Image (cartoon, rainbow, N blue to C red):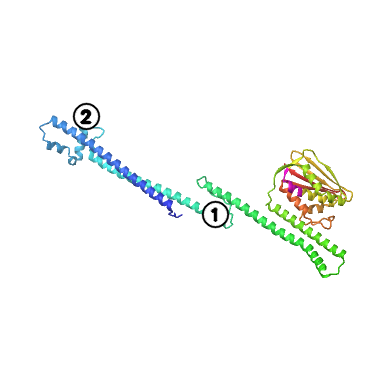
Amino acid sequence: MRLRWNVELKKLFWGLLMFMAVGFILGNLGMEIFKNYMRYENSMLMGNVLAKVKENYPQVPEEELIILFNTSEFGSADQNLGWDVMARYGVFEEFGSRTFTRQENMLKHLQLGSNLFLLALFLTGVAGIFCYLGKRQKVISGLQEYMEQLGQGKYRLELENNADDELSGLRNEIYRLTIFLKEQAALAQKQRKALADSVANISHQLKTPLTSITVLVDNLDGDEEMDADTRHHFLSEIIRQLSGMSWLIATMLKLSRIEAGVVELKREKIPVGKIVEECMQRLESAAEWRGVRWQARLQEDAAFTVDENWTLEALCNIMKNAIEHSPEGGAVTISTAENEIYTEICVSDEGAGITKEEREKLFRRFYRGSTAPEDSVGIGLSLSKAIVEEQNGHIVVESEEGQGTRFLLKFMK
């Protein structure tokens, strides 16, 4: 991958170049200092030798002595002969026949070799760094492309080449963000679908009452001589239809919010008896009108962690259903039980019971059983089931024809 020369890369390049220049300068400066020191030591050695020769052989002219130290006049035979002589007496064994001129030449070659080695080492290091930076930029470009795809709603969950490097943390965070965004998108899609289904269901269910209301209003408007009893009947029917429509819309919206997951249920520990007694009070008038009596068998100290208002909604729908399917003079029994696994509420009626085929359809939206009241819409049990399941619970229906029905609401701990 071709490197993109951004500001940081240019700074790195010039920094490496300066480092190389300083390295070369310091290395060559050190070699020059060492050569000067060796030259000084050699001059000191020759000066001492010259002084001793002058002292012991004063008759030798100085010009002759200087010629002796002129290394350019030496040949290989002279060097070998001198080496043999000094070797017999153990003089200068560490130097042998090597004069400083040869040493200086060797130092020059050593200096050149060191510079070439440093240059090769620097170029290798630079090549390695730029190779690493190229791979790094490739990964960053991939992550940028990945983020652009996220912005377009393309959630590509891939964890290939997830090595343990400095970019792995960023990559993992991006993948976690991808999962979060995908879940949010799925939730939003689910909410939109639930809303669309709710609107379609409400529209379908409102057609009949709206048609009925329109006919009644047309009759009231077209017949000015309608008698008071008929007019009163029509108005009562309009009010009943409007009340049913209002209840249907409110219940459908509640169910849609539960199914879409937008309802934040509170979690607080509440005595089960408190919920049951509240529902009995709310439905007392309906029970009296139907001639049904309550039988409560509540376990003391039974409690569960639920949202009070929504649980009241669910239980009241179950108990209202039991009232509607109980014969006149019958009883609806509410009992509670608790163990280490779950808390249970049981609602029993003495109705005609439910067939196996009907039990399988019981919680479907807008399903009305064969024994359902005429004004039943078939939405209450669906709402109850959604509320209970949203709170880590489930509903079990037990029924046989002619022996009544039992609804078991179990809230897991």
Magenta stretch bounds: 305-313
Q: What kind of residue is marked 2? A: Tyr
Distance of label 1 from label 2 (alpha carbons): 83 Å
Q: Is residue 97 visible?
A: no
Q: Is residue 283 left or right of residue 162?
A: right
Residue at coordinates 15% horizontally, 32% vertically from top-left?
Answer: 53
Q: Nearer the viewer, residue 386 or 244?
A: 244
Residue marked by disc 2: 89
Q: Residue furthest left?
A: 59
- Residue 344, percent from left and from top: 77, 43
Q: What kind of residue is marked 1? A: Met
- N-terminal of the pair, mark 1 or mark 2, is 2
Quarter of the rendering containing residue 26: top left
- Residue 350, percent from left and from top: 87, 48
Residue at coordinates 16% horizontally, 37% vertically from top-left?
Answer: 68
Can you say which quadrant of the picture contains the C terminus?
A: top right
Q: Residues within 10 Å of mark 1 (few under 14, many from 20)?
A: some
Residue at coordinates 14% horizontally, 36% vertically from top-left?
Answer: 65
Residue marked by disc 1: 147
Query: Is label 1 in a helix, a strand or a loop?
Result: helix
